[in-house]
Image: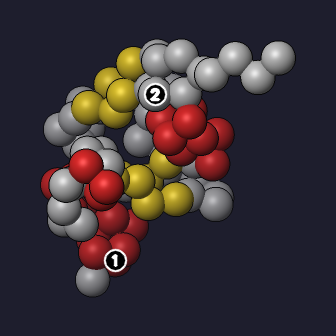
């Protein structure tokens, strides 16, 4: 039911300016391991690239739907 609701609300990656529609991944806005619930208001579709940035480079997604912001974080130094 949650995925169906997300598909109805988020037709593409929710990051402003990204219009990717294929391979979208469900993301918890407040991470599940930090107590974020699996609820429509706490989930959004992200493309693989933006999901990576949020998960591994500490970027921040904030909403409400239709007014999303995606704030840069910092990737760990891999050198």
User: CA–CA distance between discs 2 and 1?
Assistant: 27 Å
Quadrant hosting residue 16: top left
- State the image coordinates of residue 65 (x, y, percent, origin top left): 23, 42
Q: In the displayed structure, would residue 70 be above or below residue 18?
A: above
Q: Quadrant of the N terminus?
A: bottom left
Report if residue 18 is visible in the image: no
Q: Residue at x 24, y 66 (%)?
A: 38
Quadrant hosting residue 75: top right
Q: Report the colour scheme.
A: secondary structure
70 horizontally vs 1: left or right: right
Q: Residue at x 22, y 35 (%)?
A: 63
Disc 2 element = loop
- State the image coordinates of residue 9 (x, y, percent, origin top left): 30, 58
Quadrant hosting residue 69: top left
35 horizontally vs 49: left or right: left
| Mark nearer the viewer, 2 or 1 | 2
Q: Quadrant of the C terminus?
A: top right
How many tags in the picture? 2
Mark 2 neighbour density, 10 Å: few (under 14) some (14–19) many (20 or more)? some
Q: Residue at x 28, y 75 (%)?
A: 2
- State the image coordinates of residue 54 (x, y, percent, origin top left): 48, 35
Q: In the displayed structure, would residue 73 be above or below residue 13?
A: above
Q: Residue at x 76, y 23 (%)?
A: 78
Q: Which residue is mark 2?
A: 58
Q: Point out the tag, 2 or 1, that comes first from the N-terminus.
A: 1
Q: Which residue is mark 1?
A: 4
Q: Residue furthest right?
A: 79
Labels 2 and 1 touching (C-beta < 8 A) = no
Q: Nearer the viewer, residue 35 or 26?
A: 35
Disc 1 element = helix
């Amino acid at each position: 039911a949650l995925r169906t609701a997300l598909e109805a609300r988020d037709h593409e990656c929710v990051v402003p300016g990204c219009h990717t529609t294929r391979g979208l991944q469900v993301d918890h806005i407040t991470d599940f391991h930090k107590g974020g619930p699996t609820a429509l208001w706490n989930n959004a579709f992200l493309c693989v690239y933006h999901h990576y940035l949020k998960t591994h480079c500490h970027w921040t997604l904030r909403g409400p739907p239709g007014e999303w912001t995606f704030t840069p974080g910092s990737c760990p130094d891999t050198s």
